[in-house]
């Protein structure tokens, strides 16, 4: 959930699982997983010779449905590649919740797709998500944030691509991710100034659940809304790290209630359990409660 003032919808996006569009078994298995978002990939996870079959298979699965509350997102190939335009055309017909654009670096990258959706008369409910994963996106942060603020561009969510960022920059992904941190927080700023959500990159070593849990916690502490995943094993720890804990919800309610007390009506800062609490803390608390309620609906769906 965005902490910006202009939160349009509260939608849990703790976990977003990639799956290669060419993997029929994964597409089917996804219907039973406890996951908020499915990223059906036509780009990096699909070999050039499998691109067309993957596109057909993904679009068929999206049209057929059966994914319940899970958001369905098709990651298309870049429009400059031999497959991108056809991916976009097919995705608009299949009607996922969003199309995910790889390697976004400019207003033009986003607007080209937004213009196409408008021309095709695609409903406003078909959204655009954008990958931030190159040095160019870091340098053009202001331009991308401005593009995301324009409702014409339908931009709801940014996804950080740490593998491409490492490849393009030469910075290694080591425990703690110190080298990447300034760039990840720059991407967070892009999202927060535009009211979009933002999801962390993947953790490649899916057998190392301990290292994975640490990286989830780091992302949650940084203020990211969720994390992208590559394997179903990563779901449970990720969902836990990106959901408010029971103590956080309890504390949030306590702050909200304290400001509702008659004696605190005119006050900006009060004391709760020996701590200073300002009205901005109660605002954060209201978002914590709202996201916890939205998550409980996913769990019971
Ligand atoms: N989504 C859904 N199901 C998945 C999955 C995924 N991303 N990854 C694995 N599974 C399923 C497998 O189909 C298998 O199901 P089954 O036991 O019912 O047959 C089960 O989980 C166990 O899989 P496992 O044998 O441990 O892994 P694998 O060797 O089959 O696959 C990867 C390993 C890395 C190739 C696979 O996890 C994958 O393709 N991940 C996503 C890669 C991707 O999309 N990258 C692009 C963005 S970074
Ligand atoms: Mg990438």
Image (tube, helix red, strand yellow):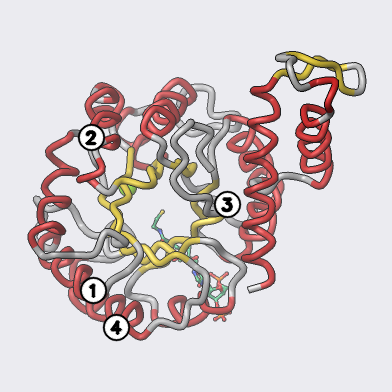
First in residue order: circle 2 vs circle 3: 3
Q: Looking at the rendered structure, which numbered label has been put on residue 60?
A: 4
Mark 1 near mark 3, Cβ–Cβ under 8 Å?
no
Q: Of the residues tagged 4 and 2, which is closer to the observer?
A: 2
Seen at 78% across and 31% down, the residue is 260
Q: Earlier in the sequence, mark 1 or mark 3?
A: 3
Q: Is residue 12 left or right of residue 146?
A: right
Q: Earlier in the sequence, mark 3 or mark 4?
A: 3
Name of the residue lying farthest toward the right: 273
Determine which residue is flagged by label 2. Answer: 147
Ligand 1 near label 1 (Cβ, under 8 Å)? no
Q: Secondary structure at mark 1?
A: helix
To which residue does mark 1 refer?
A: 55
Q: Which residue is mark 3?
A: 14
Find residue 156 and report its horizontal and vertical position in percent: 36, 47
As displayed, is residue 92 above or below residue 224?
below
What is the spatial separation of the Cα atoms under label 1 and label 3, in whole angstroms?
26 Å
Residue 147 locus on image (x, y percent): 23, 34
Residue name at image x 69 percent, y 71 percent: 300
User: How many other residues sit within 10 Å of disc 4, few (<14), some (14-19) or many (≥20)?
Assistant: some
Task: Judge from the rendering whether residue 13 lies leftward or rightward of residue 83; answer left or right.
Answer: right
Q: Give residue 36's quadrant in the image.
A: bottom right
Mark 1 / mark 2, whichever is N-terminal: 1
> In this orientation, which residue lies closer to the viewer: 123 or 158?
123
Q: CA distance from mark 2 to mark 3?
A: 24 Å
Q: Position of residue 87 (x, y in %)?
A: 17, 66
Q: Label for residue 8?
A: none
Which circle, 2 or 3, is nearer the viewer?
A: 2
Q: CA distance from mark 4 to mark 2?
A: 31 Å
- Which quadrant does the C terminus fall into? bottom right
At numbered mark 3, what does the secondary structure look like: helix, strand or loop?
A: loop
């Amino acid at each position: 959930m965005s902490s910006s003032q202009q939160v349009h919808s509260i939608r849990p996006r703790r976990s977003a699982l990639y799956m290669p569009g060419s993997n029929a078994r994964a597409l089917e298995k996804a219907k039973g997983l406890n996951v908020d978002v499915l990223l059906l990939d036509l780009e990096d996870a699909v070999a050039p010779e499998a691109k067309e079959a993957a596109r057909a298979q993904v679009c068929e699965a999206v049209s057929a449905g059966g994914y319940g509350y899970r958001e369905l997102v098709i990651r298309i190939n870049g429009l400059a590649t031999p497959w991108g335009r056809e991916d976009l055309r097919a995705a608009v017909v299949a009607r996922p919740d969003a199309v995910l654009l790889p390697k976004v670096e400019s207003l033009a990258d986003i607007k080209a797709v937004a213009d196409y959706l408008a021309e095709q008369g695609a409903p406003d409910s078909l959204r655009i998500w954008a990958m931030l994963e190159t040095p160019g996106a870091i340098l053009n942060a202001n331009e991308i944030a401005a593009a995301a603020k324009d409702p014409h561009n339908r931009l709801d969510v940014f996804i950080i691509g740490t593998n491409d960022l490492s490849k393009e920059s030469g910075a290694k992904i080591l425990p703690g991710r110190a080298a990447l941190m300034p760039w990840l927080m720059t991407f967070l700023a892009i999202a927060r100034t535009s009211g979009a959500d933002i999801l962390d990159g993947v953790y490649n070593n899916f057998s190392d659940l301990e290292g994975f849990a640490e990286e989830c916690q780091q992302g949650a502490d940084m203020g990211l809304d969720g994390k992208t995943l590559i394997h179903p094993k990563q779901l449970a720890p990720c969902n836990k790290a990106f959901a408010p804990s029971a103590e956080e919800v309890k504390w949030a309610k306590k702050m909200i209630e304290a400001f509702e007390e008659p004696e605190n009506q005119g006050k900006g800062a009060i004391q709760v359990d020996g701590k200073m609490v300002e009205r901005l803390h109660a605002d954060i608390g209201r978002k914590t409660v709202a996201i916890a309620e939205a998550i409980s609906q996913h769990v019971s769906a």
